[in-house]
Amino acid sequence: MNTASDPLSAALADLGWSAFFTDQLTAEDDALVPMRIATVHRARLTAESGRGPVRLILPIATNTADYAVGDWALVEPDTNTLIRRLNRQSLLERHTEGARVPQLIAANVDTLFIATSCNDDLNPARLERYLALAAEAGTKPVIVLTKADQVPDIAPYRDQVTGLQRDLPVVAVNTKSPETLAILAPWCASGQTIAIVGSSGVGKSSLLNTLAAKTGEDAQLTGEIRESDAKGRHTTTSRSLHAIATGGWVIDTPGIRTLHVSDIAAGLGEVFAEITELAPNCRFRNCTHAHEPGCAVQAAVKAGELDSARLARWRKLTDENTANTPVQTGPRGNKITKVGGKKR
Ligand SMILES: Nc1nc2c(ncn2[C@@H]2O[C@H](COP(=O)(O)OP(=O)(O)O)[C@@H](O)[C@H]2O)c(=O)[nH]1
Ligand SMILES: [Mg+2]
Ligand SMILES: [Zn+2]
């Protein structure tokens, strides 16, 4: 790698290359160049090189399922041959029922925009799931309250979400207004990568269109005009890495739209920190905070310091996670394990 002043280095930095990845290079990698995986197909990978899109040549034993959109890989520049993947800073994955290995959804996402509308559909339990997913993936969450233009006052919606995790950023937007770019700019600087999750209809596609300044044929279908109504469209453009107008990138893969919760024990501890931090004060080490005497969590509920509905949601999610988690899986598919005792 050359100095930061040359155009290729600047382009790579804009693509999200950082010291975290430089630190993984050895002298043997001198002849290789980094590229960021842009699309993943069964038998084909494409990447962004900083000089334009590249179709990678895959060594025979390559399993494309080991790669996620957003991954950084080292490539032999003359032939575009894929040599190896670098360790990930974050990884969103999906554990489907019956599947032996998780499906990789997106890698090296800095910020996860969790979209929810300012209306009666706002559901704290569902948002806590997404927050746990973000924590487990190693990505920072931001709650994006959409359809802010539809309500006279966003305060009641903001109040429902601010307490769902410590120091949780919450913003309110009209996804179709250009002002949204300025509101989300703190997470959309050059080199930053975001992804958008949320229920159907909350405005994910509208938000992406605004962020990536997509119009006309290029735009994602929204609302009334669903994919099923417009067959044949978008068959040639299966891009997953979209440049944000103000800098940074949005990763959008079909898998991102159907993410659900399992294997998120560490994530739960982070989202519900005020509960898990009380547990050492309980009389019994394996206290379930339900009915045991000397329970510090129940004491906090009685003292009015902890919302009993929040505790009930924590229990439901914890039970569900236990039931859904089959076996211990490799942390982010990385070779190095355990950072600070947390599963990563
Ligand atoms: N008024 C208003 N309508 C919105 C906003 N965001 C999305 N919509 C509308 O809500 C519907 C669903 O939006 P869409 O982007 O398709 O949601 P998705 O299913 O999450 O991708 C569409 O009719 C959009 O035009 C918003 O911020 N304000
Ligand atoms: Mg959509
Ligand atoms: Zn307890």
Image (cartoon, rainbow, N blue to C red):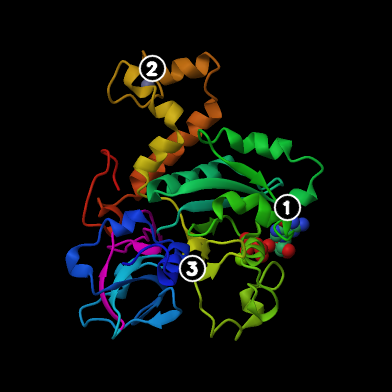
Q: Residues within 10 Å of mark 2 (few under 14, many from 20)?
A: many
Q: Position of residue 145 (x, y in %)?
A: 66, 48
Label 1: which secondary element: loop
Per the image, the residue denoted by label 2 is 295
Identify whether 209 is placed above or below 113. below
Q: Position of residue 287 (x, y in %)?
A: 33, 24
Amino acid on which disc 3 is placed: Thr
Q: Is residue 110 in view? A: yes
Per the image, the residue denoted by label 3 is 253
Q: Residue at x 51, y 66 (%)?
A: 252
Which quarter of the rendered picture does the N terminus lie within? bottom left
Per the image, the residue denoted by label 1 is 147
Task: State whether label 1 is within 8 Å of ligand 1.
Answer: yes
Amino acid on which disc 1 is placed: Lys
- What segment is highlighted magenta in the picture? 80-107
Amino acid on which disc 2 is placed: Cys
Numbered circles on residues, count: 3
Q: Residue at x 66, y 68 (%)?
A: 213
Q: Residues within 10 Å of mark 1 (few under 14, many from 20)?
A: some
* Viewer-proximal residue among 171 and 99: 171
C-alpha distance separating marks 1 and 2: 41 Å
Identify whether 130 is placed above or below 103. above
Task: State whether label 2 is within 8 Å of ligand 3.
Answer: yes
Label 3: which secondary element: loop
Q: Is residue 88 in view? A: no
Q: Position of residue 182 (x, y in %)?
A: 67, 53
* Viewer-proximal residue among 190 and 319: 190
Identify whether 43 is placed above or below 203. below
